[in-house]
Image (cartoon, rainbow, N blue to C red):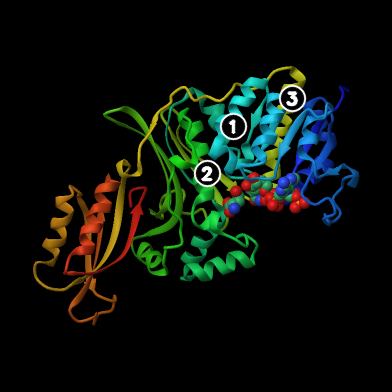
Amino acid sequence: MTSPVRLALLGCGTVGSDVVRLLHEQSVDLAARIGAPLEIAGIAVRRVGRDRGDLPVDPALFTTDPLGLIKRDDVDVVVEMVGGIEPARSWLVEALRAGKSVVTANKALLAEDGATLHDAAAEGGADLYYEASVAGAIPLLRPLRESLHGDRINRVTGIVNGTTNFILSAMDATGAGFAEALEEATELGYAEADPTADVEGFDAAAKAAILASLAFHTRVTAADVHREGITEVTAADVASAKAMGCTIKLLCIAARGTDGRGETVSVRVHPAMIPLSHPLASVGDAFNAVFVEAEAAGQLMFYGRGAGGAPTASAVLGDVVAVARNRLAGVHAASESAYADLAVRPMGEALTRYHISLDVADRPGVLAAVAGVFARHDVSIATVRQGPAGGGPAGRGDDADLVVVTHVAPDAALAATVGELRGLDIVRSVASVLRVEGGA
Ligand code: NDP
Ligand code: HSE
């Protein structure tokens, strides 16, 4: 058999340790599929002395010198499972410029500065693969960057963060509030000790940038993505969604559009109400799913485990096999496709729909005054539902609950409508504002 393809593994935590385990358990099959055995040249970690259980690997392979490992002549492929922007970016640029292909799970880095990595890959004639960076085990980036390259993608809508999907699913199932559901997610090991990146939408925004870049052949960074997390979603919002036959999900939405400048894209992450009939509504627990709408292919749905050691390691190893095969064949994959270079529209111009719950004075003329605000901002109302305040038959005397669902309008017009409603005397409070997606 051909001489081995030698791997430098950077990181041996949740993902890295499962990659090591699977490399060991599947070594014979992997070698047969590639046409050469895979060998671990070294494993860079922060703490060599850390207890790693019964990991099937020679302890002498561990090092705290990632750069030294990458530069070794006997390293062919670098597999990065550390995370963060620096020093990971410097390591990967070093590897790629030296012609060593890279497999990475690092969504934060790709979304922040993927261009630098793609440029280094082109310069060094090396492969840059990152299937594990979005939606864990789900084969999604390869379909976008290869299988769908003959088609035109119009929209990508996804649930790409497992932690927040677990929390929202728990709130929906039990009526729990956000804090209680987060506590359960932490106890079960879904949420990290510091859950900010997940619950504030940073993780999903990074993934949205990667998906939009691939779908629209345009460089989109995390800074281009409008981001809202789920910390403001209340049990009352969830109950209100249920009353409308909907559920609330943290969605990433990347959509093609046109305006005076020609074709544009908008990319956003925020909680939204979707009807129970929508394919994403039944995606529960910590699962991920991505719904792709393409011109010729129509609607496609990708579903599976978006996080966890073994599922993510599966995606990493798929990439390792691909780059190892390319190396043996003396080829590398086509470089990044960013030829379309579409303008990224600001959130204010994105077309959305709102579900607005108001606590209003219950007297003549109130409905007309509220409707007037919508009309002034050129926002069309789809439905209005009024009931006694507090929901019960007795209500709260002079107040009423008013729930307005709009038709599609520019987000800035909807936000301005809500702003003006807040200032009306007859509006006691704006109880909740949620975007609506998927025809609810
Ligand atoms: P962990 O925190 O579990 O592991 C990180 C690893 O990196 C550890 O082995 C750590 O060493 C090592 N490390 C940290 N800093 C350094 C450094 N300066 N030099 C050398 N080694 C270092 O992270 P995960 O395995 O969870 O995540 C890894 C990557 O995969 C991240 O980019 C993450 O976003 C991505 N990812 C993770 C998923 C998941 O479900 N966990 C899913 C999809 C993607 P030591 O062991 O000594 O502490
Ligand atoms: N924290 C992420 C999630 C891990 O909950 O989805 C996978 O990227």
The amino acid type of the residue labelled 1 equals: Arg
The answer to whether the residues at label 3 and label 1 have Cβ atoms under 8 Å apart is no
Please state if 209 lies on the left or on the right of 352 as rendered.
Answer: right
| Type of amino acid under label 3 | Arg
Badge 3 density bin: few <14, some 14–19, many ≥20, Cα 10 Å: some
Could you say where residue 41 lies in the image, as x and y percent from the top left? 84, 35
Which of pointers 3 and 1 lies earlier in the amino acid sequence? 1
The reply to whether residue 407 is visible in this rendering is: no
Identified at 86% across, 54% down, the residue is 54
Residue labelled with disc 1: 142
In the image, residue 97 above or below residue 421: above
Q: Earlier in the sequence, mark 1 or mark 2?
A: 1
Q: Are marks 1 and 2 in contact (CB under 8 Å)?
A: no
Secondary structure of residue under mark 2: helix
Q: Residue 60: horizontal and vertical position, in percent?
A: 90, 44
Q: Nearer the viewer, residue 146 or 229?
A: 229
* Residue 61, picture quadrant: top right
Amino acid type shown at disc 2: Ala
Q: Measuring from the top left, give residue 238's x and y in whole percent.
A: 40, 64
Q: Would you name the residue on which mark 2 appears?
A: 206
- Mark 1 residue element: helix
Residue in the foreground of this view, choosing between 391 and 261: 261
The secondary element bearing badge 3 is classed as helix
| In front: label 1 or label 2 | 2
Is ligand 1 within 8 Å of the beta carbon of the residue shown at mark 2? no
At x 25% / y 80%, what residue is drawn? Answer: 393
Q: Which residue is mark 3?
A: 325
Apparent side of residue 184 relative to residue 152 in the rendered image (left or right): right
Q: Residues within 10 Å of mark 2 (few under 14, many from 20)?
A: many
Task: Count the labels in the image.
Answer: 3
Residue at x-position 75% and y-position 30%: 77
